[in-house]
Image (tube, rainbow, N blue to C red):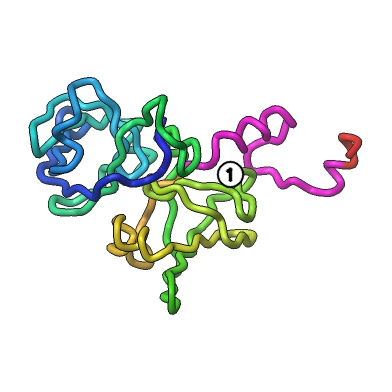
Amino acid sequence: MFTGLVEEVGVLKQKNQFGSGLRLTILAEKISPDLKIGDSVNINGVCQTIIQTSQTNFTVETVEETLKKTTLGFLRTGERVNLERSLQANARLGGHFVLGHVDTRSEILEIISLSASHEIKIKIPDEFSTYIVRVGSIAVEGISLTLADVSDNSFTVAIIPHSWKETNLSDKKVGDSVNLEFDILGKYVAKFLGIERGSKLTEEWLKELGY
């Protein structure tokens, strides 16, 4: 489990194929000394297991299912990636509950530079619209963010200067794909209420339930 608070922006040093999977070696001088084989690490929102580590680098193996659902297979050598080690039991939860289980990847539609911040508009895949609520939580590229605005087919997140500087969001361009993980609490609520993925929460439906 993670918090969505990026600890370090690392760099993809090597990308090697094994079967239909990939071995990714990340340069991460801050967190690598504290990692060991078998540890979990969040790379751009994707929970991966350490198979090799040194004082400056670590290596993970990314398999077919992960490559199908995330952007890890599209990473280029030299590209910057967001990194977070797994949450310790005695640590403050500064972001929200992030599992590192990416639901899907989606497209950046617009990046707006404001006087004190940036806004990023991202397309909502239809089947995941159930889990999107204004001022709710979402993980984008492994970063815990608040949904500032929601429309029928997109959502907007506001990026404070610190997050813009200390993550890889400043590298992104319109048309780029990003990893999305929707709030796990929202998923459980939807399941408890019997809301199918992709359906809309309507006034008529609530009346049927007696609300």
User: Residue 191 magenta-drawn?
Assistant: yes
For this orientation, the residue located farthest to the top is 38
Image coordinates for residue 2, horizontal then vertical, percent: 40, 35
Q: Residue at x 17, y 42 (%)?
A: 30
Residue 148 seen: yes
Tell me the magenta residue range. 181-206
Please indicate whether residue 9 sits to the left or right of residue 69 in the image. Answer: left
User: Residue 126 magenta-drawn?
Assistant: no
For this orientation, the residue located farthest to the bottom is 115
- Report the residue marked by disc 1: 127
Q: Give neighbour class at mark 1: few <14, some 14-19, many 20+ (Cα, 10 Å).
A: few
Residue 20 seen: no
Q: Residue at x 53, y 62 (%)?
A: 156
Image coordinates for residue 179, horizontal then vertical, percent: 39, 47
Residue 73 lies in quadrant: top left
Three-letter code for the amino acid on which mark 1 is drawn: Glu
Image coordinates for residue 201, horizontal then vertical, percent: 74, 46
Image coordinates for residue 91, horizontal then vertical, percent: 40, 32
Q: How many numbered marks have been drawn onto this rendered protein structure?
A: 1
Q: Split into 4 quadrants, where in the image is the N terminus?
A: top left
Residue 128 lies in quadrant: top right
